[in-house]
Structures are given as C-alpha cells and as structure tokens.
Amino acid sequence: DDNNNQRRTSQSLFVPQDVDEEILLLLLLGQTSTLNEAVLDWQAEHEGQRERSHQAAYNILALLSIFLSRKQAFHIIADSYEQALRFSFEHFQTWFNYGLSLISSGQSFRAYLILKECLRMQPKNIQVYLQLAKIILEYIYDFPSLFETFPSSGEDGQPLYKQTLYQQNNYLNQHEQRPKFMDLIDEAIDYCQQAAKLENPLLSARSLVLLAIAKSFKARQTSIHNDRQTLFQSAIHDLRDSIQIDPYDSISHFHLAHNLSFLNQTEEAIQSIETCLLLSPDDKFALHLYTLLLTAQKEMPQAYTQIYRATNDYPDI
C-alpha cells in the first residue's frame, strides 16, 4: 500500500524533461510567488514597497512573455497578464501588453475593449490608435467578406464575426452588444485620422495607409455613386501622401493600385503594382492583382506569364 501511494504521488509530479521545461517551471513559480506577494495597499506609506513588488511581477511577466511567445502559447500569456491586472490600476504597459496578447491568442473583441482603455490612459499614444484601427480592419470581422457587398442597413445586415474556437468556448457572452459594421469602420477612420494628426515621423506613413484602407472599405459598402467616388479619391490621396513620406513601402503601392482599379484608372494602377512588385517581388497578392489589371487591359500574353509564375511559386494561390 505504501508503495502504491508513493507511486501515485510521484506520477502526479511534474518533472522537467529539458532546459525549456525547467525555464518554464521556474518562471511560473516566480510568477505565482510575485503575484501572491504583490502589495495591494494604495496608502502613501506603502508606496515604495508596492512599487518594488509590482516591478518584480512585471519583470517576471516580461520574461514569461518572451519565452512563451517563442512557443506560440499566447493564451497563457493573456491569462498571466489578466491575473496581473488586479494590482495594475492605470498601469498602461501592463494593459497594453494584455491587449497585444489577446490579439495574438485570437480574442480580438476583448483586445478591442482593452485597447480602448489604454487609449483613455494615454490619448496621444499613436501605437494604440493604430492597433485599434488594425483590429477593426483585420480581425473583428471576417476579412475575406470585407471584399464582398454587405447590406447597408436593416436587420439582415448583421455582420460576420471572425471567432476562434477558443473565443466561442471561453469568452463570448451571448448578450454581448457589438457595434455595427459601418459604425466600426467610421471608428477606424477616426482612429487613423487622430494618429495622422500626431505627426509621428516613424508611423505617419502607416497611419495614412490604414486610413486609406478604412476609407476604401467604407466606399465598397456605400451605395451612392458620388459618395463612393469621393471616398476612393480620398483614399488615393492618402496613399500618395504615404508614398511621399515612405516611397519604399510596397504596401502603399499595392493599395494605391487596388484603389485606382476601382476608378478604372488601369494604366496608373499597373504602374503602381509594378512598383510594388519591384520592391516586393514575392508578394503573391500583388501578383494576383497585377494579373487582373493586365487582363483588364487585354494584355493576355503578359497576364498569362504572371499567372504561370504565380501558380508555380504559390500553388495555393
């Protein structure tokens, strides 16, 4: 009986099998220790002790995030930051890292809500504006469906949500109220405009690209012809400004060609997509768009050459 009890006890213990598992075990033990010892008393006389305990917890979280991100265990990172929120009142970096970990683990709508809190804490932080805009444009709604026609209004115009199995099983509340598609696009446009006003020399070009993408999405859902044309022209103007700031950004040239094609300015669109391919020759989406533009110009031999190249290099295209 003693041998059986000893065997059962030993089988329930975790024994690291390699260096990585040893590192993870030490980090998790350190995290548990620092979280349990965190000083939650906000009285002035405990300020020094509170700061030291909080800094120790943040350091462990940073190391744990670096290690787990290499293993793509983003849901564990998100859970760790969520536990740290109880002593991270108004601590921007913890909340921002929590939002980024939620994005990486596929919990886009929760990340959207957390980053809005970050924006309240630091209303002039350009990175928060850009992350919020990117979440709206890339994650909250099913990205391929954005290239199709959404109903403009009415009950049949419910948006399509991109949800991971992890979200469905753990985090989505059936009573959760989410913004409508067009309201979110307007919100993304506003975030990009606010980011562009901050005039950050490193991120101004990317702000304009995201602004143009948001306007282009909105144009494709607008039924009034003049409004559509105005939005496309505005998106093209923003992309040209972005290219002036950073002429070597292939993404700007790609979206410029894409938006020019909606206005039937095919020759100029071909010039832009050729520049994009010059800067990024392996961009399969640019190859696809280049083929479509060549076909629209009735340049069938060149279009066939691009199709042949694309299908050979990217069989899944």
Image: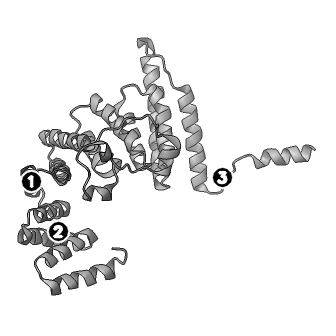
Callout 1 environment at 10 Å: few (<14), some (14 to 19), or many (20+)?
few
Residue 194, quarter of picture: top left
Q: Earlier in the sequence, mark 2 or mark 3?
A: 3
Please state which of residues 77 and 267 is positioned toward the viewer in this rendering: 267
Q: Does residue 140 appear anywhere in the picture?
A: yes
Tell me if 274 is positioned left or right of 163 in this view.
left
* Vertical order, 237 against 266 (above or below): above
Residue 16, label in figure = 3
Identify the image quadrant of the C terminus: bottom left
* Residue beneath the point at 47% across and 32% down: 84
SS class, disc 3: loop
* Vertical order, 72 against 171 (above or below): below
Which residue was labeled with disc 1?
A: 225
* Residue beneath the point at 18% across and 54% down: 220
Identify the image quadrant of the N terminus: top right
Q: Amino acid at mark 3?
A: Pro
Residue 208, label in figure = none
* Residue beneath the point at 69% across and 50% down: 15
Tell me if 123 is positioned left or right of 314 in this view.
left
Please identify the residue farthest to the right as the structure is shown: 1
Q: Amino acid at mark 2?
A: Cys
Residue 115 place in picture, x, y as percent = 33, 37
Please state which of residues 287 and 19 is positioned toward the viewer in this rendering: 287
Which residue was labeled with disc 2?
A: 276
Residue 253 place in picture, x, y as percent = 14, 63
